[in-house]
Image (cartoon, helix red, strand yellow):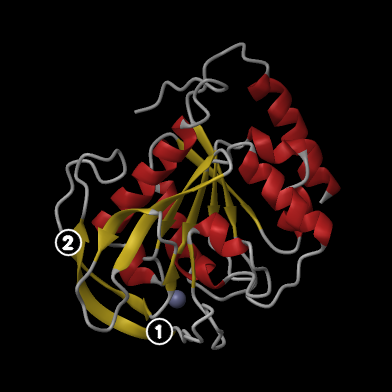
Amino acid sequence: MRLFIFIFSVLCFFKCSGVTPKTQIDVLIVTDDRKFNREAFFAVFDSFQNIHSTEISHPEILDFLGTDSIRSFDAIVFYDMPAEVILTDTQKQNFLNFFEEGAPAIFLHHSLVSYQQWDQFPEIIGGRYYNNTPLINEQGDTLQSVYQHDVRYRVNIVDTEHPITLGMEDFEILDEVYNHYYVKDDVEVLLTTEHPLSGHELGWINTFGNSRIVFLINGHGETAYENPNFRRLLHNAIHWAASQKEQKFPYQVD
Ligand SMILES: [Zn+2]
């Protein structure tokens, strides 16, 4: 871990010096011990030109969020699902500080289940998949989220003008669906579906602090990883998130 931070401190020195414009986007990918086809997943990022990815896992990410080294990355992709992890007050504050200052972050798929015990987390990501049945309002309503594997369904592009969905058309995907999850009222919805087994909103942008955070619900396994439209959404989301730091780190990428 110490070597890891040292390496990134050195990288940051060169990257933060502002001497040369960046020619690639450095993405930090957060994983945990959840099983997935690693080769197929990372092949998605390898297929993106000018995007270089580095993996960090749990629990290292929780302390890394409190260091300056994380700020040398141009975008953070959360592909973790620490559902029952209880964060310390310091770890929560590190998260909040990072997003308050404008973190370029993309949350994927099962990250909607993360940090079930932390009430503020849905404010960051813009929603929540509830593992247990909670009361969601003072009227006594409850919400029990459910999932279903291997559903083929149609994804609707809500806004074809947004940089993340620019020029895209509705498409089909074979992927896990979630249903009966919570979505914050004021997110900017980019993707929806009408499939009866799925929740309506599939992708959105949430504002938290000075961050505009992207959530994309797709990405359970190979059938999503290999879907060209999923790849395009993820590629565009990384570019868009990274461009929020453009004034700090000018880009010369496609
Ligand atoms: Zn899944």
Q: Residue furthest top?
A: 19
* Label 2 sits on residue: 171
- Percent across and percent down for residue 16 are 66, 22
Question: How much space separates mark 1 and mark 2, taking CA atoms?
Answer: 21 Å
Q: Residue at x 75, y 36 (%)?
A: 68
Q: Is residue 87 above or below residue 71?
A: below
SS of the residue at dot 1? Answer: strand
The circle on residue 147 is 1
Q: Residue at x 48, y 32 (%)?
A: 244
For label 2, the crowd category at 10 Å Cα-Cα, with few meaning under 14, some 14 to 19 and many 20 or more, is some
Q: Quadrant of the C terminus?
A: top left
- Percent across and percent down for residue 169 are 14, 52
- Percent across and percent down for residue 28 are 59, 47
| Amino acid type at mark 1 | Tyr
Q: Residue furthest left?
A: 169
Q: Is residue 56 left or right of residue 180?
A: right
Q: Is mark 1 within 8 Å of ligand 1?
A: yes
